[in-house]
Image (cartoon, helix red, strand yellow):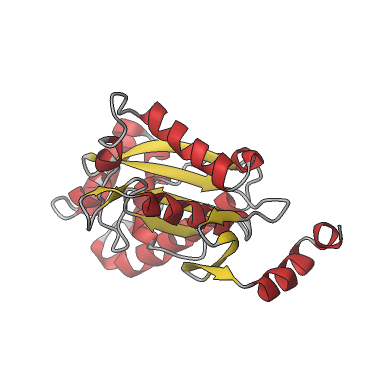
Amino acid sequence: GGTNRKLGATPPAEYFEAILKEQGEAALRSHCIPLNPGLWTLESYPAFLDERRRLLAEAMNEFVHSTDAEPTTLSVDALIEQGESATLEFKATFLWDVNQGKANNERRLDVLKAIAGFLNCEGGTVLVGVQDSGEIFGIEMDLSTLGKKQDRDNYQLVLVNELTSKIDKDVCNYLSISFHPASGKEVCRIAVSRCPKPVFVETDKGQQFYLRSGNSTRPLNPKETNAYTAIRWPKKAAG
């Protein structure tokens, strides 16, 4: 959030020029800031917004169609600014229930459903530690539930264990998990690639198929699941 927070106090041209001089073009590119100085003036603000939207869409498209699920240079701040979409989902927590003020296994299932929805579609990103509004909640309360080892490694281990036990041990081949600072807190970024086979989530109602649709993830009934898988994975469905 540092880039966006400072813009209000400093003229854009001066701020971007300082960043360019101190950190180089990569710093601006990571936030999808146009490199054309002619767009940094107040008079050019509408054109600046149009170009930045184009750069954001381009970077997101590059990420979604990557085959190795490795994060691109698109920053977490830039992702959050876009808001939830067909390829981006926010989850406030993975382990902690904000309303109940304690750990709740239902929160784990919420994250697994979001991941499965992307695996069964075109891939995408799940940001844990971000509320639906885009406000940063952080994963600190999640970490507080992990007993003596309240660190990233244990957090990732718990997440991977949930994925392998509730979905499939192979799905981790299509994920990349990383951690990023945001507004003084920490966010977990789960980059998801499309899966070459259908995946199901083990719930208290049995195995359920989830699909990303617009900016939400929804379960498909058996008839819908059969129809979708027959089109998406014809050989798998036939087998």
Choose between 47 and 210: the one closer to the eye.
210
Which image quarter holds the C terminus? Answer: bottom right
Instruction: Report which quarter residue 120 is drawn in.
Output: bottom right
Choose between 79 and 55: the one closer to the eye.
79
Q: How many discs mark residues in the rendered view?
A: 0
Mark yes or no: residue 33 visible: no
Mark yes or no: residue 176 visible: yes
Up the image or down, 187 lies above or below 109; here it is above
In the picture, measured across the screen, residue 98 lies left or right of residue 228, that is left
In the picture, measured across the screen, residue 69 lies left or right of residue 30, that is right
Choose between 210 and 75: the one closer to the eye.
210
x, y percentage for residue 234?
82, 63
Q: Residue furthest top?
A: 148
Residue positioned 34% across, 58% down in the render? 81
In the picture, measured across the screen, residue 100 lies left or right of residue 28, that is left
Choose between 146 and 56: the one closer to the eye.
146
x, y percentage for residue 29?
43, 45
Up the image or down, 54 lies above or below 168; here it is below
Residue positioned 45% across, 46% down in the render? 74
Q: Residue furthest left?
A: 9
x, y percentage for residue 200?
62, 56
x, y percentage for residue 1?
26, 47
